[in-house]
Amino acid sequence: MELNASFWTLIKSKMKSRNDNNKLLDTWLDPIEYISTGGSFERPKLILGVPNALHQYFVIENLQDKIYTEISDTYQRPFEVEFNVTGAKVNTHIETMATSEEIPTNQGSEVLQAQLSRAQAIQTTQPRSSDSLNVDLTFSTFVVGKNSEFAHAACFNVARNPGADDYNPLYIYGPVGMGKTHLLHAAGNHIREQFQHLRITYLSAERFMNECISAIRRHEMDKFRQKYRENSDILLVDDVQFIARGEAVQEEFFHTVNSFIDSRKQVILASDRMPKDIHGLEDRSRTRLERGLIADITMPDLETRIAILRYKAEKFNMRLPEDVVHHIARISKRSIRELEGNLKKVKMFSELQGLPIDGELVKRILSHHETQSTISVEEIMKLTADHFKVRVLDLKSSTRAKPIVVPRQIAMYLIKKFLDKSLVDIGKAFGGKDHTTVMNALDRVKSLQATDQDISKDIEDLETRIHNITGV
């Protein structure tokens, strides 16, 4: 089953069938349309369109968790959902609701009216320019930890002096949900505030690709190039890994980035992997992306997750006991997005049931996290590959080169230690290696730990990162 238009139609149908005669649900759910599917193969992203900021705010506050639950029951694989404002014609009934007393009593009129008023305020204050920046994502709202201090500092320096050679392009990489998009918006918002004459373009690589393909088909490439090369001074591109999907798109993207850099215009890019790990990326594009400054952002440790959670709770006007803060931070090990999502679930459940937030309630709401695997085989491979500056594909390959063999053996060792997988299963994960190869790798790593201080330190660092992710 794929996350496509038919899938979204099915989800809407199921949600309606579970909420018979709920006009409020129909009013807000019907206008949500399928746009595209993004993300990665391991964690695809369903990108949905809503008419305006008012609709986006209401859906996120009231329907997002219901949508996630329905998709989880049907898809049963890791996924993400993103709600983008499309600018489609507004449902007149929604407009009426935002300015009248027409509030369904089962939702709590005062709460819903306040949400609608807030959403309407957001709609009128959202920037109308083409930069599409989220005004709430700033440097002041980004909680800095050891995992992100370099990426944050790099973005801040770029925002203070856009176009400087040492930071152009700035390339931020890290797993999904770590705050890369936040830093892109923060840099854009700071530049817009300090350099009001500069024209800012923020978009996803997928949007760039779609527009490029459309321009090629319509023979409008001159118009496309003018839009991105001549009518913009700052280029912010998210999810750059998708650029590798087409040769023509890569060609255009390569020349667009070159045009910006040659004109001393700032380029900031974000991706879930380093340029050398983007499969299918041309060498010249890879070289161009690596020529500037590369900054990574990883999963924050427990202390930073606690700090982020406290900040988010204050933002949501929630008072959380310390044991609740520590519990949510401990089990939210995948991403900052998961951390915030768990907090929102607790908030919604508490408000709907009229119950105070305490440790027992939170453990019941988030009980499914206790049974989930703390870290996966692929995640340990990725951590190891990133640490040794190699590709996951190299770890799975048959090459016997020492710069690859040692990281491969260490990854096998870590998988055995933290996941206790069988030798056969570990061998399969590494491209079908024989179980005796895995056994030799484990013995080799134990020997290296005793004789090689550098390798011992590498393993210690990786184990610390895994402990930070698992919280144990």
Image: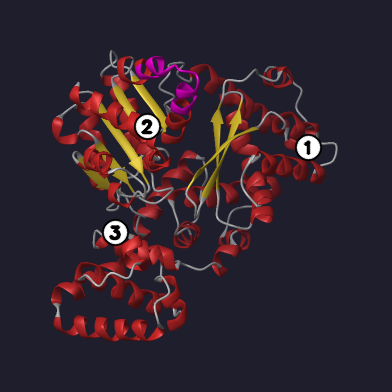
Residue on which the image places disc 1: 106
Q: Front-most of 168 and 216?
A: 216
Tag 2: Cα neighbours inside 10 Å, few (<14), some, or many (≥20)? many
- Give the quadrant of the C terminus: bottom left
Give residue 31's quadrant in the image.
Answer: top right
Residue 459 can be seen in this image: no
Give how far apart the Cα atoms at labels 2 and 1 are.
Answer: 37 Å
Residue depicted at 47% across the width and 78% down the height: 425
Which of the 4 image quarters holds residue 294?
top left
State the residue in front, 190 or 207.
Answer: 207
Q: How far from the left and from the top, in percent, is residue 424? A: 46, 81
Can you tell which of label 2 and label 1 is closer to the viewer?
A: 2
Inter-mark Cα distance, 3 to 1: 50 Å
Across and down, in percent, residue 132 comes to 44, 24
Residue type beneath disc 2: His
Determine which quarter of the picture holds residue 20.
top right
Residue 376 painted magenta = no
